[in-house]
Image (cartoon, rainbow, N blue to C red):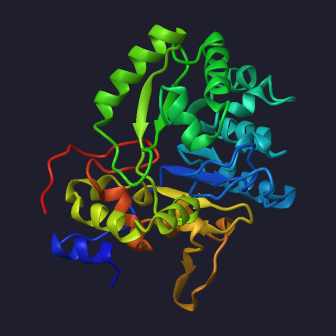
Amino acid sequence: MNRFEEKLSEHGLRLHRARLQTLQINVGRKCNQACRHCHVDAGPWRTEMVSEAVAYQIGQWIQRNHPEIVDITGGAPELSEHFCYFVETARAAGAHVIDRCNLTIIEEAGYGGVPDYLAQHEVEVIASLPCYTAENVSRQRGNGVFEKSISALRKLNAVGYGTRLPLNLVYNPLGPNLPGPQAGLEAEYKEVLGRDFDITFNRLFTITNQPIARFAEDLRRQGKTEEYMALLANSFNPGTVEGLMCRTTLSVGWMGEIYDCDFNQMLGMQIRNGANRSRCFLWDLTLDDLEAGAIRTGDHCLACTAGCGSSCTGALASLSLTR
């Protein structure tokens, strides 16, 4: 039994799937950035990307099953040659579409039309901005990223994002710490970005750094792995379990294989196909196959239940903890 399952057991809790709401598509590992906290270990040198054949099969599944939300991520999802296919197929199927944008892609040559395209198809933008100061963003994401991010946010505002179209930002802590209260950080972001840059946005989502991939390597180099895992375990909040994203989200990888969440995907923890435990692909399943199914867990799941909790849409509960 892993440490996360031990915490569930202590509180008499069981984790299982509810009705699917969100299909999250990870189009691949290629990105124009290489952030220190990246759980995908993405970067410009990565070549793993969804193929035309796999993209088509994912699109066919969307058309048959009509998920409420299609959440497109990466890497930088816009780098996929099939990004527009996913957007337009999902919108035609009646889905709400999310683009998890790193902002700086909009400043790259050939991608200046991204804001207009997203606005045309009424795609929600969830954008990474780990702080509202250049110094802290540079420490986590590299020099010049803050300035490019501000420029990209202004371009998104100019086509209606933050007003008539949803623009939400994502905060990740610097180092082995839990995020502060989401509402307070959101107020600070809105004040500073509005005052200093005349930027508007809708919500701020706080997401706890996952102890996997690049961030895990940083922890090991600093000798802080056990300290961070103890922080997560000691901050376990049972009030977060009901809202965990793995209950209502299905993550599909660039080869079409499926996982309970994007974090499990990065650890290779695939959903198995029945008792034979063979590899399972998205097109092997229907919505009915998923409901009430077991969820694969590990110690890393503690990051999603620590403090206020953490999901792809931010905090899950209040700070009051029952240990």
Which image quarter holds the N terminus? Answer: bottom left
Q: Is residue 92 left or right of residue 69?
A: right
Question: Would residue 61 appear left or right of 172 to someone viewing this image?
Answer: right
- Where, quadrant-wise, is the C terminus in this rendering? bottom left
Residue at 34%, 44% (x, y): give it. 179
Q: Position of residue 66 (x, y in %)?
A: 59, 48
- Nearest the camera: 56 or 215? 215
> In the current view of this chain or complex, which residue is farthest to the bottom?
276
Q: Could you say where residue 200 lies in the image, as x and y percent from the top left?
A: 50, 15
Seen in the image, is 54 located left or right of residue 241? Answer: right
Name the foreground residue: 113 vs 215: 215
Of residue 271 and residue 102, the one placed in the foreground of this image is: 102
Q: Is residue 177 left or right of residue 280?
A: left
What residue is shown at x 37% (from left), y 59% (from top)? Answer: 303
In the image, 106 versus 163, the foreground residue is 106
Residue drawn at point x = 59 percent, y = 36 percent: 138
Residue furthest to the front in view is: 222
Q: Considering only vertical position in the picture, is 106 above or below 271?
A: above
Please provide percent x and percent y for residue 53. 85, 60
Query: Is any part of residue 119 visible from this angle?
Result: yes
Determine which quarter of the picture holds residue 6: bottom left
Residue occupying the point 14% across, 48% down: 320
11 vs 238: above or below = below
- Above/below status of 265 relative to 43: below
Residue 259: tell me if it is visible: no
Corner quadrant of residue 148: top right
